[in-house]
Image: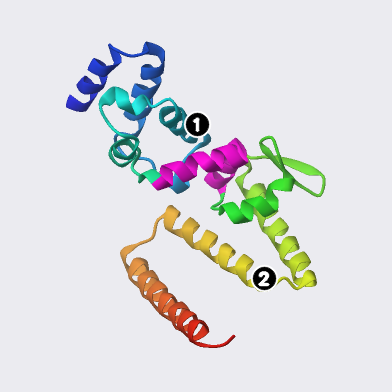
Amino acid sequence: MEQNETLNAACAHVDGAKLLELGTWLGRHQAFGLIARKCSAADAECLREIRDNKYYKAIGLTWEEFCSQHAGVDRKTADRIVERLEEFGEAYFNLSQVIPIQPASYRLLSSNVTGNTIELDGQKIPITPEHAPRIIEAVRELRSRLEREQSKTRVPFSALMNRLDLCHSELAGAVRRGIGDSDRVVLIALLTDAISRFEEVSITISSSNL
């Protein structure tokens, strides 16, 4: 309540229309904050407007303070969100709402994305929650084709990178859907073991002449 009163007081001395946008955005996110992987295109656009026009100053904050106190992410994450909006447009965020996808993977698929559709074999699928099963299947098929194509050119470790990216996406999707306490314990143990193994490989590579 006190936070809203502070915002309203600031709005009285600044451009009303733009501060109304800021107030609406803040109200929508106060309860749960912004999580980067769940960020919508509208959220990303609002973040860009707030940052570029310095609307955060209307409530007496720096951009870094605004991010941590109201967006629920640090400044670097917020900047990355805006950068992805500027590089990829809305489609990236709409797609990431349906299936977790990293920027590197999206760049590989971007030639199949037009407007707010993803194309597979001449069929354009709207990137909306209603088409989630078809979108997920299309992304997996396109990734598979890219992996096969890359393996032909023998790009070092490209197949491994795709498999790791797919593993991360599936893991992120499982966590987003929710896991029970017993599964959480098992998952933490698996991840701890995986991290340990990767660190061993990293140490071996660093200390060798490979």
Residue at 52% across / 35% down in the picture? 41
Q: Secondary structure at mark 2?
A: helix
Residue 187 in view of the camera: yes
Residue 192's x, y, as percent? 38, 75
Tag 1 or tag 2, which sits nearer the N-term? Answer: 1
Q: Residue 45 — which label?
A: 1
Q: Is residue 88 located in the magenta-colored stretch of the structure?
A: yes
Q: Which residues are magenta?
A: 76-98
Numbered-mark total: 2
Q: Is residue 27 located in the magenta-colored stretch of the structure?
A: no
Residue at 35% across / 38% down in the picture? 71
- In the displayed structure image, the side of residue 48 where residue 142 appears, left or right: right
> Residue 115's quadrant in the figure?
top right
**Quadrant of the snapshot with the N terminus:** top left
Viewer-nearest residue: 1 or 58: 58
Furthest toward the front, the residue is 209
Residue 45's x, y, as percent? 50, 31
Vertical position of residue 149 compared to residue 82: above or below:
below
- In the displayed structure image, the side of residue 209 where residue 16 appears, left or right: left
- The residue indicated by pointer 2 is 159
Type of secondary structure dominating the magenta stretch: helix
Vertical position of residue 160 compared to residue 31: above or below:
below
Residue 120's x, y, as percent? 76, 49
